[in-house]
Amino acid sequence: MAKCIEVILNAGSGAQRAREASAKLEKVFRESDRPFNISVSQGEELVRLAREKATSECEILVAAGGDGTICTVGEVALHTGKTLGVIPLGTFNYFARNLAIPLDIEAAARVILNGCQVRASVLDLDGRLVLNNSSLGIHPGVLIKRRELYRRFGRSQLSAYLSVILSAFRSPPRLRVRLATKEGEVVRETPAVLVCSNAYQVETFKLVGRECLDRGKFVVYVARMSGRYTVFRLGLRTVLRQLRMQTDYEVFCAQDVTIDAIRHKHLRAAVDGELERLQSPMRFRIAPRELIVLAPREGEAE
């Protein structure tokens, strides 16, 4: 019997876009004669819906949305033993790009029908899933500005990069953090900390750290303070892909790290592109279970 497909489509980016995406998915899946169902939701209701669909007899749970949506549905898939399908509808789509999943909706749907299962290493943050990255300091403020621009001009990479530039003239946040690994502890004063496990993102921004990922670890980037123009300098070099190791940031490779924000019990953070508040200390580690995802077969990525 053909494997049943349950699609969870995030309507957060707009009703019109959700209708268009749903129509394209329905066309591809109907032509395949595979049993499927498409559910449209957003916000907290999306979490409830994903959990409900995971209790059905479906074998493939599909997340249609940005990395935040994929993370939400992926966590449910991970805990229920379902295979995750991905329809990337976000601004950057780092998770899909890392697995060579096409950004075209119909092409991504065909991967769900004809692709192969791969095991994706993901992060565990105090018992919850993180697909790509989590950041403290500068980035959460950039996300707030980005949301304002999205509301005014719509979602686009141009608006996303403009949010970096517009945030660059603020005074840098000053975080005093303690990083503890099995090798020991270090304390740093920094405007930003980024924990990343996504090879595509590391390579796109020309950061050092790919060798950490190749060894089954993740990367912790700690930005350096450099006076009142710290945010401007880091923002500009991020956009231009010219961040420099040691001058702009330090790199730590780890499989398990606890980050304690000294003097802060709660911190604003960005987790897979979503704004949240995290409690300090935070423990990041390679998740004990890998996420099973449908990806293109070798030579078939579009």
Image (cartoon, helix red, strand yellow):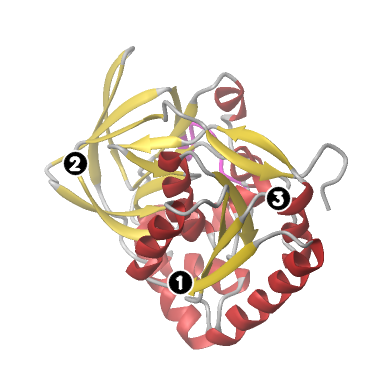
x 75%, y 56%: residue? 102
Amino acid type for the residue under numbered disc 1? Arg
Where in the figure is residue 286, as x and y percent of width and height? 43, 28
Q: Residue 108 occupies which quadrant of the picture?
A: bottom right
Alpha-carbon span between mark 3 and mark 1: 42 Å
Residue in view at x 38 percent, y 48 percent: 135
What type of secondary structure mainly makes up the magenta span?
loop
- Circle 2 is placed at which residue position? 280
Residue lying furthest right:
299
Element at label 2: loop
> Around disc 1, counting alpha carbons within 10 Å, would you say few (fewer than 14), some (14 to 19), or many (20 or more)?
many
Which stretch did the figure color magenta?
Answer: 242-249
Residue 208 horizontal/vertical position (percent): 58, 32
The image shows residue 281, relative to residue 47, as above or below, that is: above
Q: Position of residue 186 (x, y in %)?
A: 28, 23
Residue at image x 63%, y 63%?
36
Dot 2 alpha-carbon crowd within 10 angstroms: few under 14, some 14 to 19, many 20 or more: some
Report which quarter residue 31 is drawn in: bottom right
> Amino acid under label 3?
Ala
Image mark for residue 2: 3
Res 89 visible: no
Residue position marked by numbered label 1 in the rendering: 146
Q: Amino acid at mark 2?
A: Ser
Side of 82 relative to 211 (left or right): left
Question: How far apart are labels 2 and 3 at the CA level?
Answer: 46 Å
Who comes first in sequence, dot 2 or dot 3?
Answer: 3
Q: Is residue 206 left or right of residue 216?
A: right
At 35% across and 69% down in the image, what residue appears? 45
Secondary structure type for disc 1: helix
